[in-house]
Structure formats: structure tokens, C-alpha cells
């Protein structure tokens, strides 16, 4: 970008506003155009200052971040990064905020405040730069889903075996993209493994939320879990998930490890194992996200006989991972987000 990214900081704490404002102002690519004490103050400053990106505290008096997003995004869609606490309530509100239009989040440090704040500011600056390239126009006039709008009731049927395995990777904007795809899967769709870039402590809550909305069972993966028809396994934050074959069964190995392509869990690690152990019985989908995590491994899946697709640019929040997967020959075609579930189900028939 030729000009600096204009950022508005919204936080009820004067200390946080000062610390974040001073730290972000040191970044040559970022201009902090203002701060706001709450969503009411922010509303006027958004119109006046025309920021490119907002940082928004999750928990604030008068109106929390989720309620603010539900009012803001359908009228004035902007890329928003949430600043979240690691409390259970903070995690819950953060996931609701992602459903309401927030792009991503950073977590406040719980210990070693000096080093923790340094890491938070570095992560926040990085995510602000990613957010400034994001496409959030689809939120215009959109009504965010209500908590119970598409909840599925009744027992979830699990078949004893699965011949096919679906592998899905996602990052920035992926929580909503995954909801769009997985809620369209039928109850007995093939066993599905998912890597969504997300820190530890959030993936279980994310999986539990999807489990309420989907016909399939959705759970945070545990080491040794079987991949079954009717089940979606979400890689836990901070751990890599690999697919292995044990006799006639597919299972997952879940273990801590070094960052791969800057991530743990990594799409690259998961899809590489799918290429090796599932081969032509696999299908792959690469959803919205920044960077190239998983692009080379999806090419390995394709070379092993798997069928793979990626989300198209028009419906991607960030057209990074899908673009790389397509350009490197991993994804055979680009598909609009609303059609990805149907495309995967159709490929099962061939």
C-alpha cells in the first residue's frame, strides 16, 4: 500500500487505548487516526475519521462488541479485529463476534504483561495489515445469524466406517466460511477433518458451536479419534492434527509441534498426511485465509488422486490460501462459498 492503514481503537480502558495507540503508531505502515471509549463514541468517529480497520474490545459497558458489530456491519461494513480476554465469557463473546462479522482476534496476555503486550501488539499489527486487504462488502444489508436460527436437534448418526475423507483448511474469515459449508453437509457425509487457524482455548468452543448448528457431529479432535461418516473433527489450537490409517480405519493423531508455515495447527501438516494415508479416497477444500499454508500439501493430495477445490476470490474474505492452492495446481477449480458443500457432495458421486 502507498498510504498507511488508518486504524480506530475502540476500548473502554484509557490505559489500553494509550498502550495500543502508542505501540501501533510506531509501525510505519499504520496510522492511528483516533480512539473511542465505547461503541457510541466509535459510531461518530467512524463517520468522521473513515478508518480502514477497527480494533474492538470484546467486553465493554453500555454495548458489548457483538451487539455493536450486529448494528455496524449491515450498514457500514469494516474490517474489525477483536481484542479478547481468555476468560470463558471472553471466548464465547469472541466467537459470537466472528459470527457477527469480525475478521479475527488477538488475546490479552494473562501473565508476563510486558512481554505479553509486546507479542500482542506485533500480532495485532500483523492482523491489521491482513484485515486492510480483506473483502467485507458481503456484510452490507446482511442479517447475522441468530444463536438458534439453524440449530439441529436430535441424535447425530455416526456410521461405523468411512471410505472417503474430506479435508478442509481455513484461516482469516474461515470461521464463518466453515459454518456456511458444514451446515450444508448432510448427517451422514463422509468423515471430515478441519484445520482452522485459531489459538488454544477457542477451538473446543468453536467446535461445540458448530455442533449445535450442523447435522453432523462436530467435535474438537482428540488423539486417537476415529474419522467416521457423520463426524467432523476440528484440530485443536496449538496442536497439529494428522490423519493415519490403522487397519481399515482412519484415525487422527493430535500432538504438539513446531510451527509449520507459521501455524500450529497447520493445514500443510494435515493435508500432507491425508495425501499419504487417504490418497484417492480424499476430497479437499481450501477456504479463505492469508498466506499459503496447505497449498503444497493440497498439490500432494491431488497428485495422489484426491479431488480438490478452493474458494473463489469474490466470496473469500482474504484470497490468499485458496489462490495459492489453485495456482500451484492443488485445487482443480475455484468455487463460490455458497456452492462448496454441494460441489464436494457432487464429487463424491464420481
Image: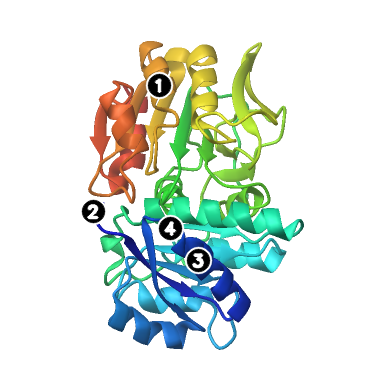
| The one of 15 and 135 positioned closer to us in this rendering | 15
Q: Residues within 10 Å of mark 2 (few under 14, many from 20)?
A: few
Q: Read off the residue under disc 2.
A: 2
Q: Are marks 3 and 2 in contact (CB under 8 Å)?
A: no
Q: Are marks 1 and 3 in contact (CB under 8 Å)?
A: no
For the residues marked 4 and 3, what is the alpha-carbon distance in whole angstroms?
A: 9 Å
Tag nearer the camera, 2 or 4 = 2
Q: Residues within 10 Å of mark 3 (few under 14, many from 20)?
A: many
Above or below, 65 against 172 in this view is: below
Give the mark nearer the N terminus: 1 vs 2.
2
Q: Residues within 10 Å of mark 1 (few under 14, many from 20)?
A: some
Tag nearer the camera, 4 or 3 = 4
Image point (29%, 44%), residue name: 339
* Residue 154 drawn at (x, y percent): 60, 54
* Rendering quarter of residue 64: bottom right
Q: Read off the residue under disc 3.
A: 97
Amino acid at each position: 500500500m502507498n498510504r498507511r492503514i488508518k486504524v480506530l481503537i475502540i476500548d473502554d480502558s484509557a490505559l489500553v487505548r494509550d498502550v495500543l495507540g502508542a505501540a501501533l503508531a510506531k509501525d510505519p505502515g499504520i496510522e492511528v487516526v483516533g480512539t473511542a471509549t465505547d461503541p457510541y463514541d466509535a459510531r461518530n468517529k467512524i463517520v468522521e475519521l473513515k478508518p480502514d480497520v477497527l480494533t474492538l474490545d470484546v467486553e465493554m459497558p453500555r454495548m458489548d462488541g457483538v451487539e455493536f458489530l450486529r448494528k455496524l456491519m449491515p450498514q457500514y461494513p469494516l474490517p474489525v479485529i477483536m481484542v479478547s480476554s481468555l476468560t470463558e465469557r471472553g471466548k464465547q463473546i469472541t466467537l459470537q463476534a466472528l459470527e457477527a462479522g469480525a475478521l479475527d482476534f488477538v488475546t490479552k496476555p494473562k501473565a508476563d504483561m510486558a512481554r505479553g503486550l509486546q507479542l500482542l501488539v506485533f500480532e495485532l499489527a500483523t492482523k491489521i495489515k491482513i484485515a486492510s486487504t480483506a473483502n467485507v462488502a458481503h456484510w452490507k444489508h446482511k442479517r447475522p445469524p441468530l444463536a438458534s436460527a439453524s440449530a439441529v436437534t436430535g441424535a447425530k448418526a455416526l456410521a461405523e466406517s468411512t471410505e472417503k475423507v474430506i479435508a478442509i483448511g481455513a484461516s482469516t474469515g474461515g470461521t464463518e466460511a466453515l459454518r456456511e459449508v458444514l451446515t450444508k453437509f448432510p448427517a451422514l457425509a463422509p468423515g471430515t477433518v478441519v484445520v482452522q487457524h485459531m489459538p488454544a482455548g477457542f477451538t473446543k468452543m468453536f467446535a461445540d458451536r458448530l455442533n449445535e448448528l450442523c447435522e453432523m457431529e462436530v467435535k474438537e479432535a482428540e488423539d486417537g479419534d476415529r474419522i467416521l461418516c457423520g463426524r467432523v473433527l476440528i484440530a485443536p489450537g496449538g496442536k497439529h492434527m494428522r490423519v493415519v490409517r490403522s487397519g481399515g480405519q482412519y484415525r487422527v493423531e493430535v500432538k504438539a509441534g513446531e510451527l509449520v508455515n507459521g501455524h500450529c495447527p497447520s493445514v500443510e501438516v494435515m493435508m500432507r498426511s491425508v495425501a499419504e494415508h487417504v490418497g484417492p479416497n480424499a476430497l479437499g477444500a481450501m477456504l479463505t485465509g492469508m498466506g499459503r499454508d496447505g497449498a503444497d500439501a493440497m498439490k500432494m493430495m491431488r497428485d495422489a488422486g484426491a479431488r480438490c477445490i478452493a474458494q473463489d476470490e469474490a466470496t473469500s474474505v482474504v484470497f490468499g490460501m485458496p489462490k495459492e492452492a489453485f495456482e500451484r495446481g492443488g485445487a482443480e477449480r475455484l468455487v463460490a462459498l455458497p456452492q462448496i458443500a454441494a460441489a464436494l457432495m457432487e464429487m463424491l458421486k464420481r
